Image: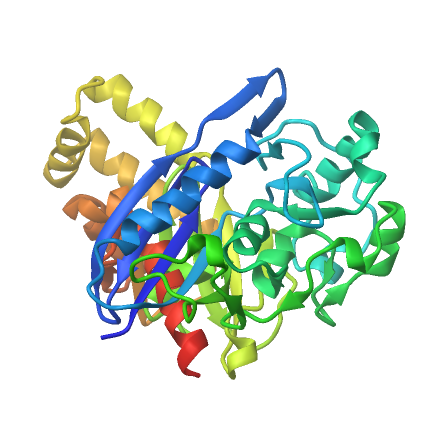
Amino acid sequence: MAYSIGLDLGTGATKAVLWDGNKIVKSSSLEIDFIREGECVTIESNSWLEKNLQQIKELASFADAPIAAISMCAASGNTLVADKNGKPLCNIISWLDGRKIEASPAENLHEIIGWPWVKGFPYTHIKTLRKEYPHIFTNGYHVCMNNDLLQYHLCGKWALDHSSATPFYLQDQRSFSYYRPFLHDLALKEEDLSPLVPSCTVVGNLREEMIGGFLTENTKVVAGSFDHPSAARACNIAGEGEMLISCGTSWVGFSPVKERTIRDGYLSDPFMIHEGGLWGLIRSWSKVGLELEEWITEHFGKEKDRYQKFSDEALSGGKAKEKMLSTAASFRERAFPETKFSRIVLCGGPSESPAWRKYIAEVWEAEIETSPYDKYTGAAGAAKMALKGVTK
């Protein structure tokens, strides 16, 4: 039996799983403590790092054989500066941070990066850090995101997968190398950043400080991906005509495509191209989950059974049914409206509701499957990538 550990470094929590090659053996979730000061949204670096390393050790204690590999996916875009030995020199700036640069650094940025200008995430954060904390850029620094920082503390080597590097806003997705004009604008050199590698690449072996029990010197650390491509891997979404719909704070549609596609409002991801597979195309409808929550609370109160009441009434007709149908239809208008899908997998809270499954299927004219991994779908995908990295 080959065990792996997969982590999903989410916006508000780290979700992690112990995987035995076929199923989740044990799972855990670790909430993130934000520091909010006006528009600034940050995370205390050392505390975040220690808690995540401890979470890995605790999961490993439930194995009964050595852990072959560890990998992670991430809601990338959380930036910090560390020294060359991985010691954080500042707090992690969350992608939720409200400070932004209005204008993008290039007219053809979407073509270069694969994403449109969405506040700039790390690009903006680096500008902010240089302005507010210039002293951290004076001696032997390393600019990274929280995912490559955690990876470094696991194996002692810097690396950033091409998928997570897309929302880093410094990678030219056409050549899978850092885009020099952007580095110049930020006064960075390539040696100040993590080397870029494909997903499922073995980065290194577990460092001595992490070894214990079934975490051994032979445990590999494997490069992962952005969170939605990882969830797609968990659900075996790999071919054209297939789509993963992830329903949370935002609703996100992810679909594999043969060619790299730069399309207004969509995000391009390398997905499985370095393994002979397809690109991924992503469409997000931001904050719809928050709007739905407001509507449900207004009509069904704040008790825990409000979602069940919403689902039950929707199946009986009335305003709840209209709300579900209109939400599903609005999402289809935004995401791949011209595509007839042969297979759709749903994950997130609505996947538990028979009413949501019924009406999404009706709007999309397709059979709806649900992820067997619920909120741990991204982490399960990371665990699969970990094992793929050590067996390919």
Q: How is the image coloured?
A: rainbow
On the question of residue 340 being in view, the answer is no
Residue 144 as seen in the image, left or right of residue 295: right
Residue 79 as seen in the image, left or right of residue 335: right
Residue 188 position in % (x across, y down)? 84, 50
Residue 339 as seen in the image, left or right of residue 383: right
Q: How many marks?
A: 0
Q: Quadrant of residue 163?
A: bottom right
Q: For this rendering, which residue is in front, 161 or 309?
A: 161
Residue 239 position in % (x across, y down)? 41, 76
On the question of residue 143 being in view, the answer is yes
Quadrant position of the N terminus in the picture: bottom left
Residue at left offset 63%, top offset 57%? 165
Residue 357 as seen in the image, left or right of residue 281: left
Q: For this rendering, which residue is in front, 374 or 203?
A: 203
Compared with 242, 391 (above or below) is below
Compared with 96, 218 (above or below) is below
Residue 260 position in % (x across, y down)? 62, 71
Residue at left offset 83%, top offset 42%? 139
Quadrant position of the C terminus in the picture: bottom left
Residue 356 position in % (x across, y down)? 23, 46
Residue at left offset 58%, top offset 53%? 148
